[in-house]
Structure formats: structure tokens, C-alpha cells
Amino acid sequence: MNTNLNIVLLMLLLFVCGPIYSQQKIEGLIFDKDTKQRIGRVLMINKTSGANVFNNSRGEFALEMQRGDQIIAQKEHYFSDTLTYQGEKVLIFNLKKTSIYIDPVTVVARKTPEQILADRHRDYDKAYKLADPGSYLSVGPTGAGLSINAIYSLFSREAKNARRLTKYFQKEYEENIVDIRFSKELIKGVTGLEGEPLDNFMVRYRPSYDFVSLATHYQMVSYIKSKYEYFKFVPYIKPLPDLNNIDINKEY
């Protein structure tokens, strides 16, 4: 009699505890459906068992579940998503934003880099003429000869300063082009970075004018995405200044 009772109790124990022991901790990732970037601070709920947990800043989570459990992902400003666990080794959620928030924009008339460079040419016409005096040969009534004005412009201190100034204006133009193509708005939209991390990224991975002047929009976006993959490993290291851009003659 006792033996039969023990068997019945054992069967009841296995029946009750079976679902518990069949559960296992499954890992998963949460992505933004549009940007494909990982999302943190998402509430993960096992609707079947009631277990819940927040994922980490890298979009990762681990939650106890078994086959057939319904798993819900919830986050503010995103539509909830529900998946039924079917034995996958990793669960992937792709959440879509409920709306696209656009910061208020004040439209201010801003000159293009070409307009700024044209203004420099107009305001510093003398400097441009000294920097590029033209041909060193002159043709007169007695025939061809060396142009005294051109020779003077080549060696005079005033002409050297003029060339230095016009080179600065050309560099300013090129940097303005880079600023427009490699903008905060574009980088923020591609990576989701904000504040100091965004500024850090822009300094560390600022492209050259030669690349920017030839790159298409698709190539710019691809460039930013590829650099962001490196940036995620060491986001807080501030870069050293470029030694080529340090003016050793400047008084600090």
C-alpha cells in the first residue's frame, strides 16, 4: 500500500515539476527595425510564466522559457512585439518606432561653401592677384621678356603672405564641404549617437575632403556605418590632435 502511494506521489511530483525543469534560459537580441541598431532598456516578458527582465545597453537579454511560451518585448516609443518560442537558440526582436520624432527646426539663411569662397575672392581681391600674378613672361614692343611684377610677386614678403592667406581660404572651403556632407544630423540618423559620444565620433572619423568631394550619399552612409562598428568597441577614447595641423609658430 505504501509502495503504491509513493508511486502516485512521485508521479504527481513529476507532473507538477516537469514544466519547471523543462524551462531553460534563452538569450536574445533587440534591434530597431529601421536603423538596424541595437536597442537597450527593453522590457522582456514571458507571458506564459510571468517572468520578466530588462535587456542591457547592448540589446542583449536572457530569459527563462520553454517551447510554446509567448515572449513580449515592450519599450516606450516602440510598438510591442510578441514571439512564440519554438526552440530557437537565440531570439531576435525587431521593434518599430511608433512615430518619428523630428526636433523643431529654425530655418536660417546660410551661405554655401561656394558663396563663402566667392566672398573671399571679392573681399581679398588684391591678395588673390598677388598670390597668382600670372605669366612670368611679358610681351612688349621690343619683344618677349620677364615680367617684373610677376617676379616681384614671386619673392616679395607681401606675396608670400597673400599665398598663405589664399591657401587658408581654400582650406576653409574644403572644411565647409566636409561639414555639410559629414553632418551631425546624418551621423545621428545612422548611428543614433548624441552629445559627447557624437562629437567624439565626428572628430575621430572625420573624412578627408578628397573622399567627401567624390563620395555619393550611399557611400557616405556606408562609411559612417563601418566606422561606427569600430567606435562601439572604444567609444570614450579621445583622439590626439593631428600633428600636421599644429602650427609650431603660433604663440599660445
Image: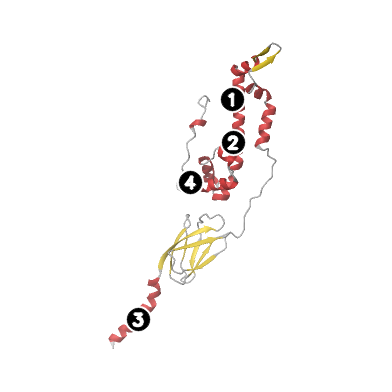
Q: CA distance from mark 1 to mark 2?
A: 17 Å
Query: In the rendered structure, are the residues bearing label 3 and label 4 in contact, judged by CB atoms less than 8 Å apart?
Result: no
Colour scheme in use? secondary structure
Q: Amino acid at mark 3?
A: Met
Q: CA distance from mark 1 to mark 3?
A: 92 Å
| Residue 201 point in image, percent of width and height | 52, 43
Mark 1 closeness class: few <14, some 14–19, many ≥20 residues within 10 Å: few
Indicate which label's residue lies in the foreground, 3 or 2.
Answer: 2
Does 85 sit left or right of 178 as displayed? left
Residue named by callout 3: 11
Query: In the rendered structure, are the residues bearing label 3 and label 2 in contact, judged by CB atoms less than 8 Å apart?
Result: no
Rendered image: mark on residue 12: none
| Residue 157 point in image, percent of width and height | 59, 18
The mark nearer the N terminus, 2 or 4, is 2
Q: Secondary structure at mark 4?
A: helix
Who's the residue at 28% across and 85% down the image? 3
Q: Secondary structure at mark 3?
A: helix
> Which of the 4 quarters of the picture holds residue 170?
top right
Judging depth in this view, the residue of 6 and 129 nearest the camera is 129
The mark nearer the N terminus, 1 or 4, is 1
Q: Amino acid at mark 2?
A: Glu
Q: How many marks?
A: 4
Who's the residue at 59% across and 21% down the image? 160
Residue named by callout 4: 231
Who's the residue at 31% across and 83% down the image? 7
Residue named by callout 1: 164
Q: Amino acid at mark 4?
A: Phe
Residue named by callout 2: 175
